[in-house]
Image (cartoon, rainbow, N blue to C red):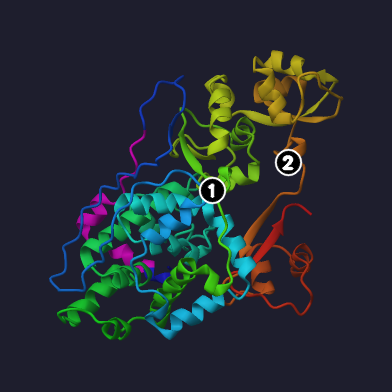
Amino acid sequence: MHSRWLRLGTLMPALLLTACATAPKPTQSEHAAPTTATSLPPMDLRIAPPERLAVPLAPAPEFDVAEPALDGAASVWSRLRTRFALPGCEYSPAVQRWARTYTQGPDRFAASLKRALPFLMLVLDELERQDLPGEFALLPYLESHYEPIAGRSGMPAGMWQFMPDTARAVGLQVSPHYDGRLDAWASSAAAVSMLKRYQNEFGDWRLVNMAFNAGEYRVKKLLQENRSAALSREDVANLKLSPITHEHLAKLLALGCVINDPQRFGVTLPEPAPEDYLVRVTLTAPIDMRVAARLADVPEEALRRYNAGHRQSRISASAPMHLLLPKPALGRFQQRYTQLAPSAWSTWDAVKLRERSGLGQLAGAAAVPIDLVGAANGADPAHEFAAGTTVFLPSALGRNVGTAQPPVPLSPEAQQNRSTTITVKSGDNLWTLAKTHKVSVNNLRRWNKLSDKAQLKPGQKLVLQGAD
């Protein structure tokens, strides 16, 4: 989705009046334990369906709705294939060409799917709930490789690549503190609901995909000009849409083609690990993301990726009060979260100690359980910190025992340079990427071990290091 979403800024008045509703926030007492929603219920987007076109189209495919699968390594791909309903490899030569392109490096393709699995499974859950074809679980892979990409002002963002106006129209909050386009759960619920609405409007899965790419009103106008009894493959291929839109459909079908028969392309599909299953935790107050990572014993980088919608270290009070956590971390987080007073959840700092202090001494002074301070600093209860050591402590205590430091990950497991990963898009080169991300070309080459003559390829992952 690119500039096509700009057209959606002219949505119908009725839609504009109702589209900005956000998910209702849970009502909880201040000290209530966090609640969880492992089934990740859909958001109430409150969008009135548009008037259906009076154009007879090819009927939507029907398939049996299987019982929800239990968590299991082998269940994800079979669940996905069960819901496949679009034409596959034989739809056109372009589909087979793109299938071969995606799998030129089978191991690299499988690795990208492995990284996408936590989010892909969220989307699959939502597709099953809305009774939509499995191929649409591959749309975010096509758009962003399932990366929560933060777009520049006025540009598309998130794994679904929503434009800001479109995001707000489907009920997502977009602000400097929180961007719903980067929230994997919220954006997926909104995107799948939008696809469901397109299904009800167009009744043809090819047109649903084209509306997603080119904009629903562009497709609607073309259909009004082409009132055939049913749209054949040739009719759809000849619709006067951008070649990019027709290619978008071929790419989606190509991904489905590979997933449906991976052996044909030499691909071994990855199996999800227990930590790839995400659960949504409803919070009762804002929390510092660094504290949350330590409470859950989850790497801070992973937690930030799962919850990229929260744009600052401390969750804003105006943002939705939820976090996505790996399922194995749920029990640890819930137990520790309920031990802290609300004032301690969002006010921890990195502090350089003025004098030697034991872990128990620091925990007692802060009235915080010793195992939480230990978890925050990767230390056992008997550990003592030398003067000058930087530790992670509640802010009120930190001001009394040391000097506040820039926020950095402090546990031994996190003492590595912060880095982010970007995905190369068509037309990118080292110079444009270096300028966009305000780094040097030489550093980009060094961080990614690229030679002077190295050529970038769309879909390639590049590492951006933090302070060098």
Is residue 161 something that shows in the picture?
no
Q: Which residues are magenta?
A: 5-25
Q: Position of residue 461 (x, y in %)?
A: 64, 65
Label 1, on which residue?
A: 308
Q: Position of residue 76 (x, y in %)?
A: 47, 53
The numbered mark, 2 or 1, whose residue comes first in the sequence reads 1
Q: Would residue 19 be counted in the magenta stretch?
A: yes
Residue at 68% from the left image edge and 67% from the top image edge: 434
Per the rendering, the mark at residue 414 is 2
Secondary structure under tag 1 reads loop
Q: Is residue 2 above or below residue 117?
A: below
The CA span between labels 2 and 1 is 19 Å
Q: Is residue 122 above or below residue 32?
A: below
Residue at 78% from the left image edge and 67% from the top image edge: 449
Query: Based on the displayed image, in which of its 4 quarters is residue 231 positioned?
Result: bottom left
Q: Would residue 16 be counted in the magenta stretch?
A: yes
2 and 1 marks in contact (CB < 8 Å): no
Instruction: Please indicate whether residue 179 sits to the left or right of residue 214 in the image.
Output: right
Is residue 275 something that shows in the picture?
yes
Q: Amino acid at mark 1?
A: Ala
Q: How busy is the neighbourhood of tag 2: few (under 14 within 10 Å), some, or many (20 plus)?
A: some
Q: Position of residue 238 (x, y in %)?
A: 30, 86
Residue at 25% from the left image edge and 47% from the top image edge: 46
Query: Based on the displayed image, in which of its 4 quarters is residue 269 positioned?
Result: bottom right
Q: Amino acid at mark 2?
A: Ala
